[in-house]
Amino acid sequence: MTAVPHPRSEAAAPAGSGRRSLALALLCGALGAAVALLSSRQSWSAGTVEVVGTHFPLTAKGSDVTGVPAALAIVGLAALVAVFAVRRAGRLLVAGLLALSGAGTVAAALLGAGDGSALDEQAAQAAGDSSATATALTHTAWPYVAAFGGALILVAGLLALWYGRLWPAMSGRYERDGAPRPRAPRPADPDRPEDLWKALDRGEDPTGA
């Protein structure tokens, strides 16, 4: 005998997938943005410059190298919140922006991992010579940490694109089709002439007869 699936189990499956994907997207998006922002404030590279026979140390933070990861992390965080304020096509557009923010964060962080231009600018200022460059360059792992944060934002965006249709919206004042719920007209007050006229305009009997 062929087993017939229970209607409740079929309805619960999409709801369960929606809740799990929603929780995972929120976790990945918020954590990814925090990691990218934190990494941008850390030291990405170091070096030295020789000034009058003395070697001066130089350090460049992630924000000195590139401001793109931090900016895109903020955009991604805003998009993550905006996903719940829109529906249908709007939700797809915002989810796409969230995914692009994550991909851009990854690309910018990886490009800045070996960039020494920020140290060269510091070397030129310290030496008072525009042709001076930093030497003995070293790089930290923080750019790759920022890239990991961007990857988490990207995952949140992909989840929103795939499962976003199952997620709830912020407001509960609307029906499933997105139309506002109609309000029942207020009964006419016989002691208020304006209410009687409004009832007559609606084609109602204000006397209740």
Image: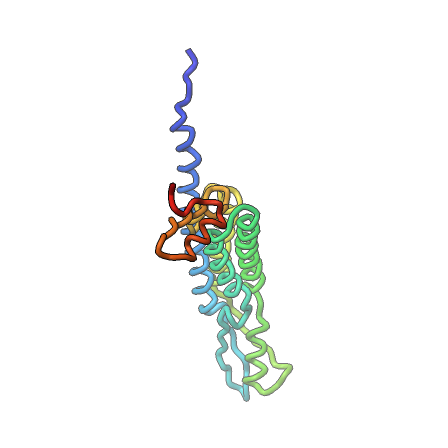
In which quadrant is the C terminus drawn?
Answer: top left
- Name the one closer to the observer, 151 or 113: 151
Q: Is residue 75 visible?
A: yes
In which quadrant is the N terminus drawn?
Answer: top left
Residue lying at 46% horizontally and 69% vertically, measured from the top left: 43
Question: Is 143 positioned to the left or the right of 117 in the image?
Answer: left
Q: Is residue 25 visible?
A: no
Task: Please name the colour scheme applied to the rendered image.
Answer: rainbow
The vertical placement of 28 against 71, above or below, is above
Q: Quadrant of residue 32?
A: bottom left
Residue lying at 49% horizontally and 82% vertically, measured from the top left: 56
- Please, which residue is most extreme toward the right here? 131
- Name the one closer to the observer, 186 or 150: 186
Question: Is 105 positioned to the left or the right of 2 in the image?
Answer: right
- Please, which residue is most extreme toward the top here? 1
- The x and y percentages for residue 58 are 50, 77
- Name the one closer to the observer, 204 or 178: 204
Please state the total of marks drawn on the protein image: 0
Residue lying at 45% horizontally and 43% vertically, measured from the top left: 175
Q: Quadrant of residue 9?
A: top left
Residue lying at 53% horizontally and 54% vertically, measured from the top left: 98
The vertical placement of 6 against 132, above or below, is above
- The x and y percentages for residue 136 are 53, 72
- The x and y percentages for residue 138 are 51, 68
- The x and y percentages for residue 177 are 50, 42
